[in-house]
Image: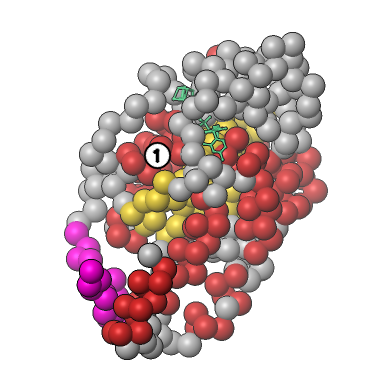
Amino acid sequence: MSIPVETAPASATPPVQASQVTKDTYKGKIHPDWCPGCGDFSVLAALQTALFELGLKPHQVLVVSGIGCSSNLPGYINSYGMHTLHGRSLPVATGAKLGNHELKVICVGGDGDGYGIGANHFVHTMRRNLDLTYIVMDNQIYGLTTGQVSPTSVKGMKTKSSPYGSVENPINPIPMAIVGGATYVARAFSGKQKHMVEILKGAIQHNGFSLVDVFSPCVTYNKDNTYKWFNPRIKILEEQGHDPTDFNKAIERGYQWGEEIPVGLFWRRTNLPTLEELEPVLHDGQGPLAWRKLGLSDEQAHALIKELL
Ligand SMILES: Cc1ncc(C[n+]2csc(CCOP(=O)(O)OP(=O)(O)O)c2C)c(N)n1
Ligand code: SF4
């Protein structure tokens, strides 16, 4: 079988015609199969609005996910997308970003996906300060697998896998990301969509690794951390004069849990170079790696592809 070898254009310009972006541009063709009322609907809508308001074109955006209800999101948005393996969105996204550093790369997934099986990738992607936006739809439970305890389930929470109450301390992703090297660390709530849009726009525009942890209630399996439970507790940092350049305050507010739970931008740092900025090969004037010639003859390329397939 002869495999056609794609010849890369010499210029860095992607071979896609940019069309006019409208409010509907980012609407996908498939209707989400999430349960009615799932917090993930709000995250999808906020992300679509943020991309529209930033004037980005779908061909400039790649959305990468792992596995879970929340990780189905790339199927519902009109952009480039990859639905990868459980916990593996960040390494796949890292490869994509280094392959084409002009892309806006956005990772999405759940708390189980990102803070459980994918926690090692989370830590290493943060310390590299790759220019990625990571949105975690944190419902404090495994939704897709029908309600087991997750790394962010509250201690004592009764789930299918912890019928007498979880005995484990949960992960707190906010302080973890601040000390882990993330340079934009924020939290949003599905019940405050307008605020989420602003947080997402800031994250996507930020040059460096941004985490947006979103309280996105699982209305089917988490009967503790519901909209009703969150609504009176959620307080917006931006309305309280929080300074996101104050490291100690960011950590302190990140630990707050109980009667008052802050959402908003906890921490932002702008003086740390990104991994892409430190990679000399990306700055030799030849544009993204993805658009460069391979430097192989057609025969060599065919032989290589044959070997890999
Ligand atoms: C390697 C691997 N282990 C386990 C699973 C089963 N599994 C699928 S989704 C999931 C957890 C989903 O929870 P979360 O990431 O929080 O997403 P949600 O469904 O709540 O949005 C698990 C354990 C899997 N698909 N692959
Ligand atoms: S099971 Fe939970 S997380 Fe999954 S779609 Fe339903 S409400 Fe959303």
Pointer 1 local density, CA inside 10 Å: few below 14, some 14–19, many at least 20? many
Q: Position of residue 267 (x, y in %)?
A: 67, 50
Type of residue at label 1? Leu
Quadrant placement of the C terminus = bottom left
Q: Residue at x 61, y 27 (%)?
A: 140
According to the picture, the residue beneath numbered tag 1 turns out to be 73
User: Which secondary structure type mostly characterizes the magenta part of the structure?
Assistant: loop
* Magenta stretch: includes residue 8: yes
Q: Looking at the picture, does residue 72 appear above or below residue 185?
A: above
* Magenta stretch: includes residue 101: no
Q: Nearer the viewer, residue 4 or 231?
A: 4
Which residue sits furthest top? 164
Q: Position of residue 227 (x, y in %)?
A: 53, 18
Q: Residue at x 43, y 87 (%)?
A: 285
How many numbered markers are drawn?
1
Left/right placement of residue 275 relative to residue 54 reads right
Q: Position of residue 288 (x, y in %)?
A: 41, 76
Q: Looking at the picture, does residue 217 appear above or below residue 196?
A: above
For label 1, the SS is helix
- The yes-or-no answer for disc 1 within 8 Å of ligand 1 is no
Q: Position of residue 117 (x, y in %)?
A: 63, 42
Question: Which quarter of the frame holds ligand 1?
Answer: top right
Residue stretch rendered in magenta on the structure:
1-19
Quadrant placement of the N terminus = bottom left
Q: Residue at x 60, y 35 (%)?
A: 112
Q: In this view of the protein, can residue 201 be seen by the observer?
A: no
Q: Residue at x 37, y 57 (%)?
A: 61
Q: Nearer the viewer, residue 113 or 224?
A: 113
Q: Looking at the picture, does residue 285 appear above or below residue 266?
A: below
